[in-house]
Amino acid sequence: MANLEIFQFPTRSDNYGVLLHDPQTGATASIDAPEAGPIQAALAQKGWNLTDIIVTHHHADHTAGIGALKSKFNCTVYGPAREAGLIPGLDVEVKEGDTVAVGHADATVIETSGHTRGHVSYHFPGESAVFVGDTLFSVGCGKLLEGDAPTMWASLSKLAVLPPETAVYCGHEYTGANCQFALTIEPGNEALQARAAEVVKNDANGRPSLPTTIGLELAINPFLRASSPEIQTRLGLEGQPLEVIFGEVRRRKDRF
Ligand code: ZN
Ligand code: FE
């Protein structure tokens, strides 16, 4: 049923690059373009030709490679309409509900603002995969640089209702540090304890902790768990609106 081969590789200091390839048509998309060199190396390793760059948000660690890749491959660049002036080489502006195709696979655009004003995520229902940039991390979420807590909570809530088996590809690997913080917010969460132990092992073996899944994050990620009684009690916010509880978790992480 799945059409795409998905190849994830580390780049910059803590970013991930991801290539999506449709073997039937040869179409190949890069999710964001953190830097050109490692993306070109990954393409060469796979023998793929870059046809598209699909951008989540305007930050340099997601767009710095666009110029060099576009001039080498003449690929088409998709990105959020709300950040059109900020993304170099943008060809196709996308917004909520739009479809972006990679060969025979279609992604639906989900607007997930909060980290930046126009941040978008790309959900490929046929591939059971979502590419979330800096909106959601494993056991974490993006900093609220251009949005407030209610905005980010609404964005995360759109991701939370995707099928639980959906693979989540994030812009960065911060899982180990995120687990240390999360354990201060919900120390009694056994699934979180297990994830923290697993991540220590992964780090020691140089193995990535991504992709994660929606179902796993719902069980362990304090930024998705504002309704957890343990978290509400610990924060002294029993029964408060979920976006308020989320906002307090985010504030504590910023100071952690
Ligand atoms: Zn960012
Ligand atoms: Fe980033």
Image (cartoon, grey):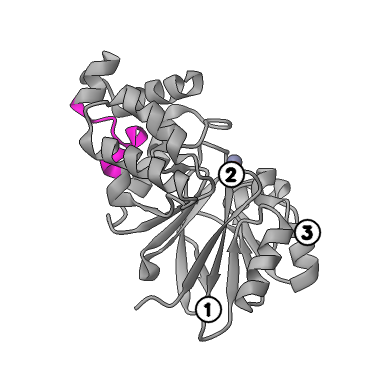
Measured in 3D between alpha carbons, the distance from the residue under mark 1 to the one under mark 3, in whole angstroms, is 23 Å
40 shown above or below 66: below
Magenta part of the protein: which range? 218-229
User: Element type at marker 3?
Assistant: helix
The answer to which of 236 and 207 lies nearer the viewer is 207
Question: Can residue 50 be seen by looking at this rendering?
Answer: no
Amino acid type at image mark 3: Gly
Residue occupying the point 19% across, 25% down: 229
The answer to which of 23 and 12 lies nearer the viewer is 12
Give yes or no for residue 4 being in the magenta stretch. no
240 shown above or below 50: above
- Expressed as whole percent of the image width and height from the top left, the position of residue 93 reads 62, 58
Disc 2 or 1, which lies upstream in sequence? 2
Which image quarter: residue 31?
Answer: bottom right
User: Element type at marker 2?
Assistant: loop
* Some atom of ligand 2 lies within 8 Å of the CB belonging to the residue at label 2: no
7 shown above or below 219: below
Q: Which mark is residue 103?
A: 1
* Mark 3 lies on residue: 67
Amino acid type at image mark 2: Asp
Relative horizontal placement of residue 27, taking residue 4 as reference (left or right): right
Which image quarter: residue 71?
Answer: bottom right
Relative horizontal placement of residue 178, taking residue 61 as reference (left or right): left
Residue occupying the point 32% across, 24% down: 185
Question: Can residue 37 be seen by looking at this rendering?
Answer: yes
Front tag of 3 and 2: 2
